[in-house]
């Protein structure tokens, strides 16, 4: 993609860090004010009206409204949780930068440098693709109801019938006393004000995913460096061998520390993700199955986006759990038994740490992985079937 091209292939997650700064999650106090004001604006425009002005009488509309509220709370809560962990995030970025700067001094054709450059190119490309995917999703979410409403208004403009179709709103809510379903001018005020809130929500939704993706891929590249250097360790001897071992131990420790920091940053957010995922899936399935109308197009977009994000997060968490185990495999293949005793002891310590499972957890209750996603989906569907029979 041509926008925001990668200027420095040895930089640490430049696209993600740039947009964190742009939307108030890095930088000085003015940036923090931007984040807080954006959060308050979303709460006042999207969350507060649902809570303050109640729901309409139809059960399908109540379920839809609750689904949307849960989705908005999910976005805002994850953004706030990340904002409280910025110190750990900066430490993680600093550790990665320290490793990258060391690799940057190597020859341009060195395997280590190629690993980092290839990783950064992939991170940059896929982060921008994800941002574009979310931008398309929010555009469909917002503009389809606007187009539907425009068509309803044009087709019924000259009609004197009292039984006119309602305008289609982006979310099921009452909006500060305005007749947003019957008065086109009230609808325009609502759409104009809420458009900013919806696009800001999309920004913070995308940033949450981009941060986790960029961090995991960067950490994976760091562990790949360890494995690559272990493969050539047996070719060294004497002082050179011991210096290389010391560097490898330090690099491995830094990698484990990065995983620990990422876990500290995200373990509560992962629990929020899984709990909200179950609640949102159930409520959205109930709403869609109860009364499938044109209004549920927006709800379908939310369902697809939420499902996709949760699956990708579980897939990334699975990858993170495996990267440390690859170091153990590399040690076994490095002919370490034939090396000097002191080197064997150093590698044995690395092996012991590499055999311990590391990864992302949901508030330290369980590890996140693709298998967990399957269980959550199965549980959600079972609850949905039970509730559908009762309603």
Image (cartoon, rainbow, N blue to C red):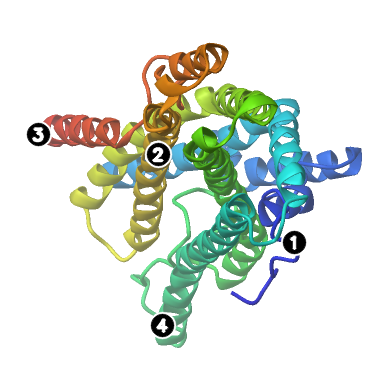
Q: Which residue is mark 2?
A: 319
Q: Secondary structure at mark 1?
A: loop
Identify the residue at image location x=90%, y=38%.
29
Q: Residue 176 in the image: x percent, y percent?
A: 62, 48
The disc placed on residue 387 is none
The crowding category of the residue bearing disc 3, from other C-alpha atoms within 10 Å (few below 14, some 14 to 19, many at least 20), is: few
Q: Residue furthest front?
A: 238
Looking at the picture, tell me which residue is in the foreground, 23 or 253.
253
Lower sequence index among marks 2 and 4:
4
Position of residue 254 relative to residue 131, above or below, is above
Q: Mark 3 sits on what residue?
A: 389
Mark toward the start of the polypeptide (3 vs 2): 2
Q: Nearer the viewer, mark 3 or mark 4?
A: 3
- Sequence-first disc among 3 and 4: 4
268 and 148: which is toward the camera: 268
Q: Residues within 10 Å of mark 4 (few under 14, many from 20)?
A: few
Considering depth in this image, is 50 or 109 the residue closer to the camera?
Answer: 109
Residue that numbered label 4 is attached to: 156
What element does badge 2 sit on?
helix
Dot 1 crowding, Cα within 10 Å, few <14, some 14–19, many 20+: few
| Place of residue 253 in the rendered image (x, y in percent of width and height, measured from the top left) | 61, 22
Residue 266 x, y percent position in the rendering: 55, 28
- Identify the residue position indicated by label 1 in the image: 8
């Amino acid at each position: 993609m041509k926008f925001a091209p990668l200027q420095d292939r040895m930089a640490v997650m430049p696209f993600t860090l740039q947009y964190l700064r742009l939307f108030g999650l890095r930088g000085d106090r003015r940036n923090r004010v931007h984040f807080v004001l954006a959060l308050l604006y979303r709460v006042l425009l999207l969350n507060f009206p649902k809570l303050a002005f109640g729901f309409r009488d139809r059960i399908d509309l109540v379920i839809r409204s609750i689904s949307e509220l849960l989705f908005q709370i999910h976005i805002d809560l994850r953004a706030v949780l990340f904002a409280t962990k910025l110190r750990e995030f900066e430490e993680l970025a600093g550790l990665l930068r320290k490793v990258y700067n060391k690799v940057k001094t190597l020859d341009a054709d060195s395997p280590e440098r190629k690993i980092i450059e290839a990783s950064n190119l992939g991170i940059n490309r896929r982060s921008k693709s994800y941002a574009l995917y979310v931008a398309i999703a929010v555009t469909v979410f917002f503009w389809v109801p606007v187009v539907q409403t425009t068509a309803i208004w044009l087709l019924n403009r000259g009609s004197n019938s009292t039984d006119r179709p309602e305008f289609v709103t982006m979310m099921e809510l009452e909006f500060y006393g305005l007749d947003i379903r019957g008065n086109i001018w009230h609808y325009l005020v609502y759409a104009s004000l809420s458009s900013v809130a919806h696009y800001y929500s999309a920004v913070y939704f995308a940033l949450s995913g981009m941060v986790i993706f960029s961090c995991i891929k960067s950490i994976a590249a760091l562990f790949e460096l360890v494995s690559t250097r272990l493969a050539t360790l047996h070719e060294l001897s004497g002082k050179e061998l011991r210096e290389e071992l010391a560097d490898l131990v330090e690099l491995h420790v830094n990698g484990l520390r990065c995983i620990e920091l990422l876990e500290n940053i995200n373990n509560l957010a992962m629990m929020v993700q899984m709990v909200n995922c179950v609640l949102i899936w159930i409520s959205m399935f109930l709403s869609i199955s109860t009364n499938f109308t044109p209004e549920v197009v927006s709800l379908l977009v939310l369902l697809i986006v939420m499902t996709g994000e949760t699956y990708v997060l579980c897939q990334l968490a699975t990858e993170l759990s495996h990267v440390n185990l690859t170091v153990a495999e590399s040690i076994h293949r490095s002919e370490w038994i034939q090396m000097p005793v002191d080197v064997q002891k150093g590698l044995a310590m690395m092996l012991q740490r590499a055999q311990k499972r590391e990864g992302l957890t949901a508030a330290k209750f369980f590890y996140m992985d693709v298998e967990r996603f399957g269980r959550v989906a199965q549980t959600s569907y079972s609850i949905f079937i039970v509730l559908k029979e009762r309603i």
